[in-house]
């Protein structure tokens, strides 16, 4: 496959982002439930600002089984996501829509990644989405499987880990992707 910055990404492309471990730091063995628990990863607002210039649309697809477990409500999640979107907007970045899967991992729900439900939902809302001209960025193999099933280009973020992955590309974090794409 061509290098990421040789794919000729333009406004006809869509960027799919996972949230935890991509936008904000993951909390080990717990969920980000309140605004004071959100720690945005360094360089993320700046990276999203660049992606906003490049891609036609940016959507977030996030598994949030903390809701299914009753540890947080959908209102809590909307509050958190609102905080994140506002921060990104102060850096002139734009998130077009956030999709979340509240189902438990044990539910076997196709809506939850690695199921493709959130991708299909996005395609229904934005019919111009072409999965062949879409990039999925995540930090777990479930994200990569989601993107692969839909025919997207996939990027795994390492976050200082040693890992093996089926993703097309591996980068350290979102800012490293943005830096690479600025040279296309
Ligand atoms: Mg994640």
Image (cartoon, rainbow, N blue to C red):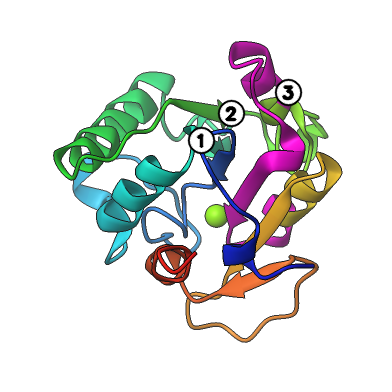
Q: Are marks 1 and 3 in contact (CB under 8 Å)?
A: no
Quarter of the image where one finds residue 95 = top left
Quarter of the image where one finds residue 138 = bottom right
Asked which secondary structure carries label 2, the reply is: loop
Of callouts 1 and 2, the N-terminal one: 1
Q: Nearer the viewer, mark 1 or mark 3?
A: 1
Q: Nearer the viewer, mark 3 or mark 2?
A: 3
The front one of 149 and 92 is 92
Ligand 1 lies under 8 Å from the Cβ of mark 3: no
* Disc 3/disc 2 C-alpha distance (Å): 16 Å
The extreme left residue here reads 90
Q: Residues within 10 Å of mark 1 (few under 14, many from 20)?
A: few
Looking at the rendering, the stretch of residues picked out in magenta corresponds to: 120-143
Picture coordinates of residue 136, whole percent (x, y): 63, 49
Q: Which mark is residue 102?
A: 2
Residue 45 lies, with reference to residue 139, above or below; the image says above
Q: Which residue is mark 1?
A: 11
Q: Which residue is mark 3?
A: 120
Asked which secondary structure carries label 3, the reply is: helix
Q: Within the magenta stretch, is there residue 133?
A: yes
Quarter of the image where one finds residue 126 = top right
Of callouts 1 and 3, the N-terminal one: 1
- Which residue sits at x=45%, y=35%? 71
Asked which secondary structure carries label 1, the reply is: loop
Residue 41 lies, with reference to residue 161, above or below; the image says above
**Going by the image, does 93 lie left or right of 121?**
left
The extreme bottom residue here reads 162
Residue 120 lies, with reference to residue 80, above or below; the image says above
Q: Quadrant of ligand 1?
A: bottom right
């Amino acid at each position: 496959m061509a290098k990421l910055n040789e794919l000729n990404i333009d406004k006809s492309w869509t960027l799919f982002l996972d949230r935890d471990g991509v936008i904000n730091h993951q909390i080990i063995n717990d969920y980000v439930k309140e605004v004071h628990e959100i720690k945005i990863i360094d360089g993320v607002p700046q990276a999203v600002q660049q992606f906003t210039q490049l891609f036609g649309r940016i959507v977030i697809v996030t598994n949030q089984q903390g809701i299914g477990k009753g540890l947080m409500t959908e209102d809590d999640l909307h509050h958190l996501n609102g905080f994140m979107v506002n921060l990104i907007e102060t850096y002139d970045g734009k998130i077009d829509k956030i999709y979340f899967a509240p189902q438990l991992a044990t539910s076997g729900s196709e809506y939850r990644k690695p199921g493709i439900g959130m991708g299909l939902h996005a395609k229904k809302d934005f019919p111009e989405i072409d999965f062949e001209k879409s990039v999925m960025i995540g930090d777990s193999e479930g994200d990569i499987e989601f993107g692969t099933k839909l025919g997207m280009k996939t990027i795994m973020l390492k976050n200082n880990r040693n890992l093996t992955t089926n993703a097309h590309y591996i980068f350290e974090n979102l800012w490293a992707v943005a830096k690479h794409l600025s040279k296309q």
